[in-house]
Amino acid sequence: MNIRSGILLVALLVLCIGFPPAEAASLSGRSSTQALWFSDEFGEDHFDLSQYLRFNARKLDSKDTLSATGYGRAWGDAAQGGGVEGRLYYLYIDKKDLAKRTDVRVGRQFFFVSAGSAIVDGARVDTRPFGPVAITAVGGRNVLFNTTGEATKRGDFAAAVQASLTNIPQGSADLSYFISYDENDLAKEIVGLAAAKRFSKYGELYTQLRYDLLSEVWNEIQAGARTAILPKFIFTAEYFRSIPVFEATSIFSVFAVDRFQEVLFRAQYDVDPKLSLNGEYRNERYGGGDKANAGEVGLRYRPRDGISLYGAGIWRTGTGGNLAGFEISGDTVFRKNYILSAGVQHDSFRRELGTGYDSATRFWVGGEARLKKNISVQARIEDTISTDFNKDFRGRLALNVDF
Amino acid sequence: MKKLPLLIVVVALAAGATMLFAAEDHRPYREMKIPECTECHRESNVIPNHGAAWNTEHRLTAVKAGANCAMCHEQSFCTDCHFGGGIDANLHVSTDRGPNYKPKNHRSSFIEVHPISAFDNPNSCARCHPASFCSDCHKRFRPEELMFQSHRKGWSDLTTTPGGPKHSTFPPDSCQTCHPGSVLPAHQWSGAHAREAKRNLPTCQACHADGDICLKCHSARTGLRVNPHPDNWGSIKGKLNRAAGQRTCVKCH
């Protein structure tokens, strides 16, 4: 945890002092102590020791309108050294009904609206000022993570506002605006629209649109229809299009780009409560006549409670290379407190500039034992064998304590 | 009269708002199994949204006002995949280099397969990885070893004679032996780079974060002065210039 995160934590604690205490506050959450070992792509061994903590404190005031929530981790690499790293994902206070029909959240938090998403150190206000209209306003310091820590610079901000209609029968409509600053310079400005409408048993229509105001392009267009009119059968048809949008402060924002387009058909069929099938076909186009066809077919079988088997095959042909693969995995629960899980993934692939097919296979096995009602131990190991790696052995051991 | 269409839209929205739709409180059901949820949802004509494609389907469900995800899921459920983490470690999920989750499409040896996956939606990688994540690894490779047409020596795979050895098998000082007096196109920049860049520019950004290598040819002041701008440049250049505080434009102009 860095200095900023520490300051945030202290500020939140000070805020709590201002509220009348509840008679019996409740605290719940999870502590997870994990050990992870692996070799990176350059053959260097790593042994990470991580401590995760998630908590939720409620009933902090007499009317239970105040709560505090947090989640973060600290970890270090015992094999490579380098000290202890920290990452605070969120730490915020919720206050319900601070004003009439208005909730407030203060602190580090993840937000997502139809125009974009971010983690910010800031505030969020949810209000229903009149009738069916709900408004969300959120913003603050834009928290950017890199591989090991935070990369936020002075003057990095992100904010959004979303207006929603909450009473559309079997439907929703949200209009939002997202803005971000890079060192005090405007970096992104996007308008988003998301809407969905269900037509009883016949199915539903949905769409999400994102328009980049600075580049004047449709950043994303997604529109689709789903139906479950046939018993046990769900069918989806969808169109998706996107153009990468760079921050205005990046030199890449001035370069021409091609759009990516995808037409997708997806189906799921539940033969009976024990057996279900799913499949997907995608036609992808990258611009300049480049394209690919891809798909996946899967089968899930649950012979009885506590046992689940899944098998799937994937394929892709076209620009960039060809790929065919499968995966098989299974879970079983025995004596209620023990779970055993295992799987294998295999891919055979030929990259665009390659001359022949290579292959890669990953095996994994894991288990969980609930030692007490609130204490569990998890272990998972995996190994990958591929053209470049005779072995890529890695594992994770976790001790979870719920409180 | 110009306001008539707006008025019609407002009236239509108000009419549509006559039925109050209240989302049901799902907290009592959070311990139920997915098939049990499905059974109830179908009886209510609600298409189940926790099926096999949940990974790619949940976004629209999550962004709408009143989304009830939080009734069953902590916010860590979102951040573990979107920003790394793993406090609710899933036995099916692998980790990347460090204690972060890998998404579903990072299957088998993703290091080797990812050049193919990179052709998919160019926004998808950037949702989780900053450009530096890619360059941490790519900068350790020689450019001509990467699977980019534009970065490979155009002549190196050509054979000297049909069925003969490739050009790459000869040392550079032997070129003049077979090509006396020629201007050899050694390390010639391939014309394929423009096509590759337009198709997946974030990949270029991964290694050339500041674009310096691009500006050797695309600058308005130096080099070949090749114009890189999109078709709508005339209408957006002012906006971008003002937004970035002229940080970007002065790099070339």
Image (tube, grey):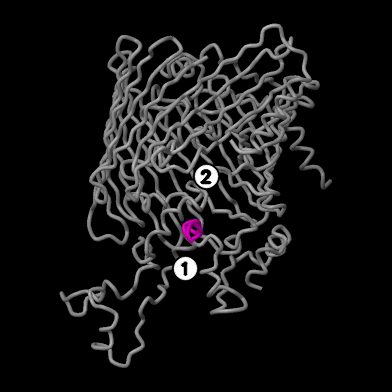
* Quadrant the N terminus of chain A occupies: top right
Compared to B192, does B65 lie above or below?
A: above
Circles 2 and 1: CB distance less than 8 Å?
no
Q: Residue furthest right?
A: B1
Q: Quadrant of residue B69?
A: top right
Compared to B23, does B112 lie above or below?
A: below
Residue picked out by circle 2: B127
| Residue A376 drawn at (x, y percent) | 40, 17
- In magenta stretch: residue B171: no
Crowdedness near tag 2: few (<14), some (14–19) or many (≥20) residues, C-alpha within 10 Å: few
Counting residues from the start of the chain, the first of labels 2 and 1 encountered is 2
- Under circle 1, the secondary element is helix
Q: Nearer the viewer, residue A26 or A219?
A: A26
Q: Nearer the viewer, residue A237 or A188?
A: A188
| Residue type at the position of mark 2 | Arg
Residue picked out by circle 1: B194
Instruction: Provide the major secondary structure of the magenta segment.
Output: helix
Real-space Cα separation, disc 2 to disc 1, in angstroms = 24 Å
The chain ID associated with circle 2 is B
| Residue A153 drawn at (x, y percent) | 65, 49
Q: Quadrant of residue A373?
A: top left
Residue sitting at x 51%, y 43%: A148
Q: Which residues are magenta?
A: B200-207
Q: Does the rendering let one see residue A294? A: no
- In magenta stretch: residue B205: yes
| Residue B40 drawn at (x, y percent) | 47, 15
Q: Does the rendering let one see residue A230? A: yes
- Under circle 2, the secondary element is loop
Compared to A306, does A92 lie above or below?
A: below
Residue sitting at x 52%, y 33%: A74
